[in-house]
């Protein structure tokens, strides 16, 4: 079923390109798949840097806490 949908989408897209005409696509499911794909790609692209920085900061905080605990434990 997914493969049929993909084939239909690609065939529709290639037909529009070959006709050099872009029109309104009334198929709600097909247009939602395209929109969700574009939105998800944008979120991943834009959010990856922020998530990476946040995780790096968290890692440094955790490593600092571990070092503090080691120093406190070794003084005993």
Image (spheres, rainbow, N blue to C red):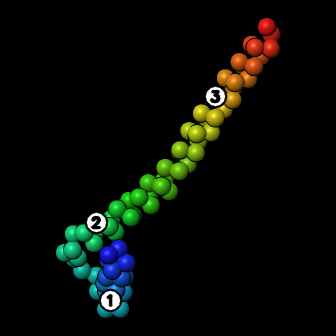
Q: Give the residue at mark 1.
A: 15
- Earlier sequence position, callout 2 versus callout 1: 1
Identify the residue at image location x=44%, y=61%. Answer: 41
Task: Judge whether 55 appears above or below 36 on screen.
Answer: above
From the viewer's side, name the closer residue of 17 and 1: 1
Which quadrant holds the C terminus?
top right
Label 2 sits on a secondary structure element that is: helix
Q: Is residue 53 left or right of residue 16?
A: right
In the picture, the disc for residue 61 is: 3
Q: CA distance from mark 2 to mark 1?
A: 19 Å
Label 1 sits on a secondary structure element that is: helix
- Hey, which quadrant is residue 37 in on the image? bottom left
Q: CA distance from mark 3 to mark 1?
A: 54 Å
> Neighbour class for label 3 at 10 Å: few (<14), some, many (≥20)?
few
Task: Judge whether 14 appears above or below 30 on screen.
Answer: below
Q: How many marks?
A: 3
In the picture, the disc for residue 32 is: 2
């Amino acid at each position: 079923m997914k493969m049929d949908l993909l084939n239909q989408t690609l065939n529709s897209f290639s037909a529009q390109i070959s006709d050099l005409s872009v029109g309104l696509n009334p198929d709600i499911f097909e247009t939602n798949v395209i929109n969700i794909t574009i939105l998800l790609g944008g979120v991943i692209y834009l959010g990856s840097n922020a998530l990476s920085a946040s995780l790096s900061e968290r890692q440094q905080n955790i490593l600092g806490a571990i070092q503090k605990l080691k120093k406190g434990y070794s003084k005993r």
